[in-house]
Amino acid sequence: HVELVESGGGSVQAGGSLRLSCAASGYTYSDHSLGWLRQPPWQEREGVAVISRLDISLYADSVKGRFTISRDNAKRTLSLQMNSLKPEDTAMYYCARKLTGYSPPTLIPTDYGHWGQGTQVTVSS
């Protein structure tokens, strides 16, 4: 079965950096787009960044220029480098796999069918 396991969350002051990682198993890794999505307190989940099987990446406007998504197909890992963090980046961050393989990358949460357990990121001002 598909398994996604995140790591790397934590607490940081505004302006700081964190790197999230996700280890994937249980499916043909290179067939699907993978994304990072987040759920701020009392809000709905939102797409943050996604990278396709062809290394095409998309970012939410709120994180462009600050976050970088990358994937390593050989190691079956996904990463999110987060720089210049802001308090509004505080959220539970999830690694997720698109439902459908060989499809374009999107930031729409309902396009994702497999989720990790999440890792908390807290940014203080």
Image (tube, rainbow, N blue to C red):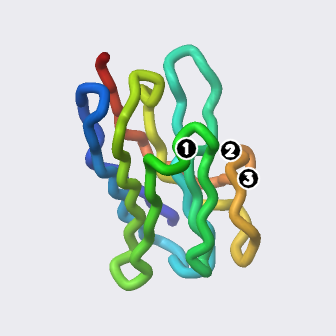
Residue wearing tag 2: 109
Residue 106 figure quarter: bottom right
Mark 2–mark 3 CB contact (< 8 Å): yes
Q: Position of residue 46 (x, y in %)?
A: 63, 37
> CB of mark 1 within 8 Å of CB of mark 2?
yes
Mark identifier at residue 111? 3
Categorize mark 3 by other alpha carbons within 10 Å: few (<14), some (14-19), many (20+).
Answer: some
Name the element at disc 3. Answer: helix
- Image coords of residue 16 (percent x, y): 26, 36
Residue carrying label 1:
37
**Disc 2 marks which amino acid?**
Pro
Query: Which residue is found at the position 36% from the left and 54% from the top?
Result: 81
113 or 84: nearer the viewer: 84
- Image position of 10 with respect to 43: above or below: below
* Residue 81's disc number: none
Label 2: which secondary element = helix
Q: In front here: 57 or 101?
A: 57
